[in-house]
Image (cartoon, rainbow, N blue to C red):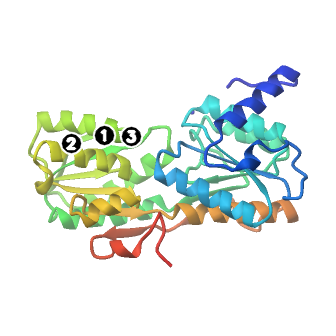
Amino acid sequence: MFRLRRLAAAGLALSLGVFALAGCGGDDSDSASSDSSGDAGGLIAIITPSPDNPFFKAEADAAAAKAKELGYETSVASHDDDPNKQSELIDAAISRKAKAIILDNAGADASIGPVTKAKDAGIPVFLIDREINKTGVATAQIVSNNAQGAQLAAQEFVKGMKSKGNYVELTGKESDTNAGVRSKGYADVISQYPAMKRVAQVSANWDQQEAFTKMETIIQKNKDIQGVIAGNDTMALGAVAALKGAGLLDKVVVVGFDGSPDAIAAIKAGEMLATALQPAALAAEQAVEQADKTIKDGKSGQPEKQSIDCEIVTKANADEFGVFARKS
């Protein structure tokens, strides 16, 4: 969230097999020769959580498109938030002599070792979406301004609840620094309104089904709820389904975070109040552009820690946004 192979030929073959099988969203170049010095300019490996979540699919697609535009081969794979699988994929990228790795990592602590290994092999790693708990290892850590986005979402939440009432907070994975940053951003705003009372705070691990189940349990214990604020849209949509099943949705304000197409559709339908959109495609494209510059010049010209501001999406402006981005 490490089965490390050494130099044995069998271990190398396993690494290559894992990398090829785990690819998702790539094209024929995913299974191309491991020689990274071909006409395309070499390989950029793109590793993210599962593309079943549209946010991760959007960033993987954007990174792959930008890399191909700049003349690189691409290999796109998912670690499914499994640190061991992530380690295998990074080993495989090292074996294929990738020019750079674009990584949305599988854990702030668990990812330090594999990223360090890539760096020691001379492969720069560009983190997107999630930071790790160490600096000086990744070449870049490009994330959304989660604190700013959370404060925007919380402000809309307070307005929607008219500054009073009972609410539930659904938080993300404890191993993901974004979960804590967003929760703190919510609290920084909501704590200024003493008439708002948090009656439950539970982790649903970014998962829609888990959010649905946990929200059902909360509702069974306490139906006097006026709001739900979630650490991502997937959990917010799980809460929407539970509230709808209990006949409470029209009485409860729901706010999420990410700006997913499904959440925007729910906002338009009046099932959610708002979401803080984080520009997944923009961060991924910037990571690839900085990787290209690093490959060519030896440095990206940018600081390691970088953040991109979020935008609030409500029913009033929902038509202005597409897939994790403002429409051009």
Q: Dividing the picture into quarters, in which one does residue 24 lie?
A: top right
Closer-to-camera residue (243/158): 243
Q: Residue furthest bottom?
A: 328
Residue at figure coordinates x 56%, y 63% from the top left: 281
Mark 3 lies on a secondary structure that is: loop
212 sits to left or right of 5? left
Q: Amino acid at mark 3?
A: Asp
Query: Spatial distance from mark 1 to mark 3, Cα to Cα?
Result: 6 Å
Q: Amino acid at mark 2?
A: Ala
Rendered view: 278 above or below 53: below
Residues packed near mark 1 inside 10 Å, few (<14), some (14 to 19) or many (20 plus): many
Mark 2 lies on a secondary structure that is: helix
Do the CB atoms of the residues marked 1 and 3 lie less than 8 Å apart? yes
Q: Is residue 42 visible?
A: yes
Residue 80, position in %: x, y?
Answer: 55, 37
Question: Mark 2 — residue?
Answer: 242
| Quarter of the image with the N terminus in it | top right
Closer-to-camera residue (320/229): 320
Closer-to-camera residue (206/11): 11
Do the CB atoms of the residues marked 1 and 2 lie less than 8 Å apart? yes
Question: Mark 3 — residue?
Answer: 207
Residue 307, position in %: x, y?
Answer: 56, 64
Residue at figure coordinates x 53%, y 51% from the top left: 56
Question: Mark 1 — residue?
Answer: 211
